[in-house]
Image: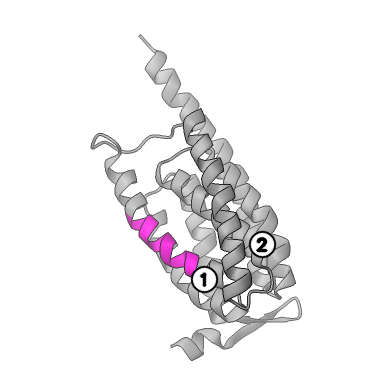
Amino acid sequence: MIDFLNATALTAFGAPTSWAEVLGFVTGAWCVWLVGRQSVWNWPIGIANNLAWILLFATAGLFADSALQIVYIALAVWGWRNWMHGRAGDTLAVSGTTATEWGWLAAAGIAGTGALTLLLDTATSSTVPFWDAVTTVLSLLATWGQATKRWESWLLWITADLIYIPLYLHKGLTLTALLYTGFLLLCIRGLFAWRRSLADERALVAVP
């Protein structure tokens, strides 16, 4: 199965594209579309995407991104439960991030990026340790926001995508770079959709 997934499925823009990358393309785009629609089915589709990315990124030498997928699977299980049961047993609603939470997120982001960059630079053969680290940390923070339905998670995903696109082009993952361009557009759409949802919820609360 691994040999099949690593085998070339097609040639995209002059670069060989594996079946793992094709599978990641399809499940990834589907997952982000479902997140924007606040569909709980984004979580199982996302897990399928993570499994494809584990193999793809390890093969490309993006070790932090590959290991990150395992963390994503654990977060997906947690996020799936959160979306279904919310904070009080109801369906989870879109909310915002408090100033205190932003402080913790910023501290975790800086510390995590520094530590992971050092680890990748000294303990692996990663060719882009800093960029591998910063995208990993941004993605983890964004996933936390997605699992708790914080609308600002889209801002973190957009920032990560703007780094991922040139990074994957640099690594020769042309189809994945194209996918992340699609992710970027879907994230912008999701940002506006979640902001509208938040405004609608606040309007309902304000009605006497």
Name the spot of residue 88 as percent of width and height, x first. Answer: 25, 34
Q: Quadrant of the N terminus?
A: bottom left
**Label 1 amino acid?**
Ser
Q: Quadrant of residue 163?
A: bottom right
Name the spot of residue 96 as percent of width and height, x first. Answer: 48, 31
Q: Which residue is mark 2?
A: 130
Answer yes or no: is residue 151 visible: no
At 50% from the left and 54% from the top, the residue drawn is 140
Q: Which residue is mark 1?
A: 66
Prevailing secondary structure class for the magenta stretch in the rendered image: helix
Q: Which residues are magenta?
A: 67-77
Please say if 73 is above or below 160: below
Q: Is residue 10 magenta?
A: no
Q: Residues within 10 Å of mark 2 (few under 14, many from 20)?
A: some
Q: Residue furthest toward the top?
A: 208
**Label 2 amino acid?**
Phe
